[in-house]
Structures are given as C-alpha cells and as structure tokens.
Amino acid sequence: MKYRILVTGGAGFIGSHLVDKLVELGHDVMVLDNLEPQVHTKKPDYLNPNAEYVFEDIRNEKLLAELLRDVEIVFHEAAAVGVGQSMYEIKKYVDVNTYATAKLLDIIVNRENSVKKLIVASSMSIYGEGAYECEDCGVVYPKLRSIEQLKRREWEVKCPNCGKTVKPIPTPEDKPLHPESIYAITKRDQEEMCLVVGRAYGIPTIALRYFNVYGPRQSLNNPYTGVCAIFSSRIKNDKPPIIFEDGLQTRDFVSVHDIVQANILAMEKNGANYEALNVGTEKAISILKVAEVLIKLYSKNLRPEITNKYRAGDIRHCFADISKIRDKLGYEPRISFEDGMKELVAWGMKVEAVDKFDKAYEELLSRGLVEE
C-alpha cells in the first residue's frame, strides 16, 4: 500500500536514510527540516530527488498544520541533539524537542488531518545507567555514580543495595527511566507525550529507543553528535581521540541501516502499537575499542588519549535488550560492528571534517561539566 508520509528531520543523518527507503518502497514522501547550521554547513548533496522538501522550522505551527493535512503516517525524527550542549542551551532543547512535539500532537488531535500512524524517535539516554546484575542481590538498576566515587577513579558501578561491583546486562524497556541530561529529559517527553496521545485518540503510535547510531551522513563537523563521528573528525585531522574515564565504558553501536529497518517494520506491522521498543544490537562495545578500530581503518599513526577524568552525567554501561522488538516486529540487526565501521570510514574519507572538539570541550569545562 502506498502512503503519504511526513518525515520531520528528514534531511538529517537518520532521517535521510529513512526517506531513501520510503521512496524506494514507493511511498509519497514529504520532508520538513530546518537544515540546522550546527549539523549542516550546506545543503546536503544526498537529498533524495524523489521526495518533496520543505526547509523550515518544525516550530512553525501554521506550516506544520498545512503539511499534516493530507499525511497518513508521520515519522518524527526532528530534534536538537547533544547531551552536553543541552545542559546549557536548556531553553533551545526544550523548545525544539518538547514544545515542538506538543505542537505536532496538538495539530493532530485538534485539526483536520489524515494521520493514521505516528512513529517517534526516542533515545537510550532516557534510561540513565543501564541494567546490572549483582551476584548477591540479582538484577539491579543503579543510578549515576557519585562524584566521590568518580574522584576516587572507581569507574565501575556499585550495587545500590550491598555496594559490591555489579556486572552490566542488556537493558530492557521496563527498566526504570532516569534521564540525566536536558536532552534525555526532552526525549522522554517526546516519547511519553506521543504514546499517551496516541492511546487516548486511537492513533497507533510507536516509540523507538535508538541506541548509539552511526553510519554515513553523520555530521563530522558537529562536536555534539555521536562518539563515532567525533572520533572520526579528530582522527581525520591527525588528532588523537579524547576518551574520558579509562575507556572501558560500553555502549551499543547500531548501524543507521538497522535503525531504518526498525522504522519500516514499525510502519508496516501492528504488533507493537502504543509501545516503546529498544533498537540496538545487544552487543556491548567499549569506547576505547571504537577509537582503536577507527584509527586502524583511517590508517593513522595515533593513539587514543585516555584522560582518566570524568564528565558530569556520564553513564558507565548501557546496551540494548532487543527481545521485545525481535518478538513483536521481527527485527534483527543485520550490520555487524566491523562492517558498519568500514562503511562509516569509507564515507568519512570523502567528506569534510572540521574538528570542533576542543571548542566544545572548553565550553563544558568553563561550566564545570567536565573535571579539570
């Protein structure tokens, strides 16, 4: 079946790949994107010629109402992205993420439109720390490590009940949410508002909790984006990747192609309506390994710089339990970390990379958000 689809943020890293797939499947696709200068230094050359583009801000309520009038499916990908930056550009992040989503939902429920399904991009950041297992207490959900613990350079997480060091395990969707940044709070806002409104009005809605997404088209000029892109930019400019703590903290790195797969399954199937689902690989990869793999693939004579310093709000381990999305939608990650990194670097070799890490770091340092 052919649908009329709106993709907010559809000129961005994830959104553009989703647009390509939707066009390939024969859908009528419209994109709303403001081409945020922090992400786009110019109009991207990868924009799909068979999609329709409106380069305006999602906060433009009148325009948004016009675009939604004939749309049947909405993929809400638009968001201000950056954990550290969100801690001092608070108004902007709440405005772009929370308030703009409120406008979107308000239009859907109060004005004439044809919306039949809503899929919203959520984030693993809403979990805070991941899930852990204590040999004495079983599964536990610790909160952030204390500043006192971090100052002692005791990086691993302790059991909140007995104080023993705990082992990270895959994080399920029913883990209590403890967002530790303004960005994470706004992503929780987006997810919960969409699901609540969807249930109330009988509009099938799905929230996809993306883990650490990487792949081609990720901005190498944005120092607030994912660690793979930040490291790539440093390495391309012959500078060592900067790693906080001891580098053994882990994340779940998922290819943008698998993110697209999850979105298409969410659109085409109804088994997960009104639910939140993890989208990851169920594999934990250390930040140090990411740096080492990228240095090798870029063929640079560099070594990661491990600072043994902490950053405010950082978690230690979080990787996805994907049993729910596997069972409900038939999702299975297809791109291995090794193949995905090769694809990222092959693309990275061809594009500009302005390293702005030092400036972003100084901004965080001046505000006391990283250890001196």
Image (cartoon, rainbow, N blue to C red):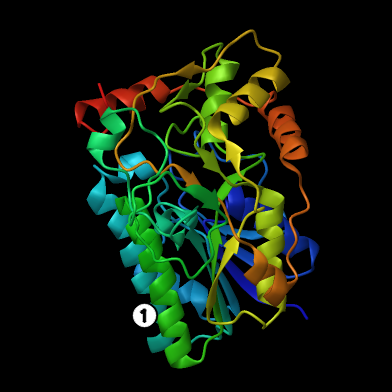
Q: Position of residue 228 (x, y in %)?
A: 57, 34
Q: Quadrant of the N terminus?
A: bottom right
| Tally of numbered discs | 1
Question: In the displayed image of the protein, which residue is found farthest to the left?
Answer: 367
Residue with the mark numbered 1 = 106
* Local crowd size for mark 1, using a 10 Å CA cut-off: few (<14), some (14–19), many (≥20): some
Q: Position of residue 89 (x, y in %)?
A: 26, 44
Question: In the displayed image of the protein, which residue is found farthest to the top?
Answer: 301
Q: Position of residue 162 (x, y in %)?
A: 34, 53
Q: Nearer the viewer, residue 203 or 162?
A: 162
In the image, 79: left or right of 9?
left
Q: Quadrant of the C terminus?
A: top left
Q: Nearer the viewer, residue 103 or 141?
A: 141
Which kind of residue does numbered mark 1 sit on? Asp
Q: Position of residue 62 (x, y in %)?
A: 37, 71
The residue located at (36%, 80%) in the rendering is 106
Instruction: Determine whether 75 is above or below 287 in the image.
Output: below
In the image, 257: left or right of 219?
right
